[in-house]
Image: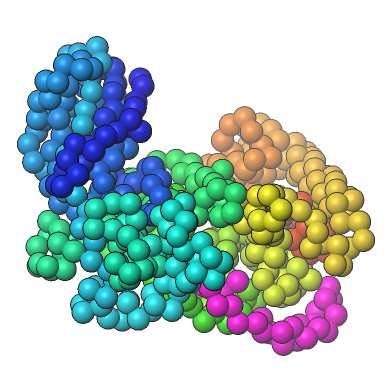
């Protein structure tokens, strides 16, 4: 199936705009969740209607589009150039239509409201607090940024530093439209003059859209690559269908951007709208600059880290949470997310925590997310009891996770900027402040931890085939030590069922828990090497206890 959503043309600059898209009729069926913006347009939210996609559906196609608030009408043309545009399904407020077509290829155009911009001062009358907050952001000063560098007349820059540049009623110049300077409400919510004129009319109410494509219209390219990097990051992946209610509220609290924000705001989630990834607005507050104090202690002392004073920096950024904290934190996938939420915890740790996992769990291995707890040394079980508070040196970096995973460089001498939004460690420059040969150290640590993981796994296999109860040995072999849903170390089938789990000694359950915590931390010991070794040593001790008659 081919689409030509970019081959649009304006039908009437006064009232209507159109874009064309073509599609061949194919079988199959696709779900129809609420459409989110899936293409980027310079300046943020599209000021003109844009067709986002034409997808196969049963006996036809599903067409989705976006644009200013108001009524739309979809038209179909049977063949290119026929000029026989026929309306489909009449006027509608929704931005999606499933169209039956018998043509080998069909062309569509969507007609909708033209942009009508007002400027944020018009919004201030009703949204005074939000307007006050937004006025303190760098977005509000975007036009002055151009003035400082002498680019305030550059059309390439104006599209992202003003409201509606190049569109009817949009920014023209400082002399003619000063009220549209800077990045304002309508950049992200769409044209709002008609809403301001009649606030009670639901038809003209501006959109609330959390898709990263809104931000990606400007934060893209060599100078601002945030969107481009995010597109290839794990945050842009929805690994499984999260729309079933039990998944939307449980797994969705960290894997679905829509579900997480709706739960934190105490709002119901729209049906079939959980398959939205972790977008910009999940981590960033679009409306205000937060004064975020990193909650690092002044002094930390334990067997791994010598006494050390830590500065408490204040971060002025549009982030929802601080970049560092040292309070242990974990949320489960049951109960209210809002009741478990702690806004003072590290932004990354809001999801990258052990998710309530303990060694007594038997259904499945811990989730692949204990990074924050490993960094602090607060997860796992030792022969002396639960894990102590044993933070790594890395936990005392002022920006913790961001320090290594979001290293950035500015655009210089024609070299593209790096914003760090792939969240991958792509440079060892920061490490050299403490480690003379950081890359070699990482490789050595990873090899040592990987070897020790395999040794612990081999010991568990030995227990399973020699010391496990006969019923487990005969039925499961080397899987006798595993969870009912085995972890990544044991492919090939289910482990002991819920009733049979009671036959596995507590020492083995503790050992497998420590093993998977280290494995699923995913850093091969880099986050907290000494503590990872301590947990794997503890696992071997537990196995030895179980092996002793």
Residue shown at 27% from the left, 34% from the top:
9
User: What's the magenta region?
Assistant: 296-323
* Magenta highlight on residue 315: yes
Residue shown at 33% from the left, 69% from the top:
175
Residue 58 pos. (x, y %): 22, 22
Left or right of 35? Residue 434 is: right
Of 276 and 342, the residue lying toward us: 276
Q: Is residue 104 visible?
A: yes
Above or below, 56 against 163 in this view is: above
Residue 222 pos. (x, y %): 60, 49
In this view, the residue farthest toward the front is 175
Q: Quadrant of residue 477?
A: top right
Residue 539 pos. (x, y %): 77, 56
- Total marks shown come to 0
Q: Is residue 282 visible?
A: no
Q: How is the image coloured?
A: rainbow
Residue shown at 32% from the left, 77% from the top:
131
Above or below, 267 against 316 in this view is: above
Residue shown at 80% from the left, 43% from the top:
454
Above or below, 497 against 104 in this view is: below
Of 92 and 247, the residue lying toward us: 92
In the picture, the quarter occupied by the N terminus is top left
Of 51 and 381, the residue lying toward us: 51
Left or right of 356? Residue 43 is: left
Above or below, 49 against 372 in this view is: above
Residue 304 pos. (x, y %): 83, 73
Magenta stretch prevailing secondary structure:
loop
Of 496 and 288, the residue lying toward us: 288
């Amino acid at each position: 199936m081919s689409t030509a959503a970019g081959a649009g043309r304006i039908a009437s600059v006064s009232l209507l705009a159109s874009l064309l898209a073509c599609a061949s009729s194919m079988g199959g069926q696709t779900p129809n969740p609420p459409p989110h913006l899936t293409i980027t347009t310079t300046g943020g939210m599209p000021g003109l209607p844009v067709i986002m996609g034409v997808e196969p559906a049963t006996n036809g196609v599903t067409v989705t589009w976006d644009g200013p608030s108001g009524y739309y009408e979809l038209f179909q043309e049977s063949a290119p150039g026929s000029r026989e545009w026929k309306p489909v399904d009449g006027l509608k407020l929704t931005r999606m239509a499933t169209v039956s077509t018998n043509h080998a290829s069909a062309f569509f155009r969507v007609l909708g409201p033209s942009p009508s911009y007002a400027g944020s001062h018009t919004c201030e009358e009703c949204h005074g607090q939000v307007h006050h907050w937004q006025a303190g952001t760098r977005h509000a000063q975007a036009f002055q940024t151009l003035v400082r560098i002498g680019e305030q007349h550059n059309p390439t820059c104006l599209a992202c530093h003003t409201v509606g540049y190049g569109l009817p009623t949009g920014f023209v110049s400082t002399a003619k439209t000063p009220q549209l300077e800077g990045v304002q409400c309508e950049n992200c919510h769409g044209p709002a003059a008609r809403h301001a004129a009649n606030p009670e009319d639901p038809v003209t109410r501006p959109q609330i859209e959390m898709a990263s494509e809104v931000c990606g219209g400007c934060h893209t390219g060599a100078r601002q690559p945030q969107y481009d990097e995010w597109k290839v990051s794990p945050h842009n992946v929805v690994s499984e269908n999260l729309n079933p209610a039990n998944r939307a509220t449980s797994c969705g609290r960290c894997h679905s951007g829509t579900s997480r924000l709706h739960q934190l705001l105490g709002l119901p989630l729209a049906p079939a709208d959980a398959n939205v990834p972790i977008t910009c607005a999940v981590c960033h507050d679009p409306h205000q600059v937060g004064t975020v104090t990193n909650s690092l202690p002044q002094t930390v002392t334990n067997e791994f880290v010598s006494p050390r004073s830590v500065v408490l920096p204040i971060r002025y950024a549009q982030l929802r949470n601080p970049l560092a904290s040292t309070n242990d934190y974990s949320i489960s996938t049951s109960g209210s997310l809002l009741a478990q939420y702690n806004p003072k915890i590290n932004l990354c740790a809001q999801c990258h925590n052990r998710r309530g996992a303990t060694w007594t769990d038997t259904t499945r291995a811990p989730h692949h997310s204990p990074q924050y707890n490993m960094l602090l040394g607060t997860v796992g079980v030792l022969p002396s009891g639960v894990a102590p508070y044993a933070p790594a040196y890395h936990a005392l970096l002022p920006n913790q996770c961001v320090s290594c995973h979001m290293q950035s460089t500015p655009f210089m001498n024609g070299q593209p900027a790096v914003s760090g939004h792939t969240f991958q460690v792509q440079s060892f420059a920061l490490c050299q402040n403490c480690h003379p040969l950081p890359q070699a150290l990482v490789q050595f640590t990873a090899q040592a931890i990987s070897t020790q993981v395999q040794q612990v796994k081999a010991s568990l296999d030995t227990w399973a085939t020699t010391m496990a109860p006969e019923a487990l040995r005969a039925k499961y072999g080397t899987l006798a030590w595993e969870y009912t849903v085995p972890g990544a170390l044991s492919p090939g089938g289910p482990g002991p069922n819920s009733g049979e789990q009671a036959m596995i000694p507590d020492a083995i359950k503790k050992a497998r828990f420590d093993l998977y915590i280290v494995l699923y931390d995913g850093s091969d010991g880099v986050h907290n090497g000494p503590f990872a070794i301590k947990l794997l040593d503890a696992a071997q001790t537990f196995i030895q206890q179980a092996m002793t008659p």
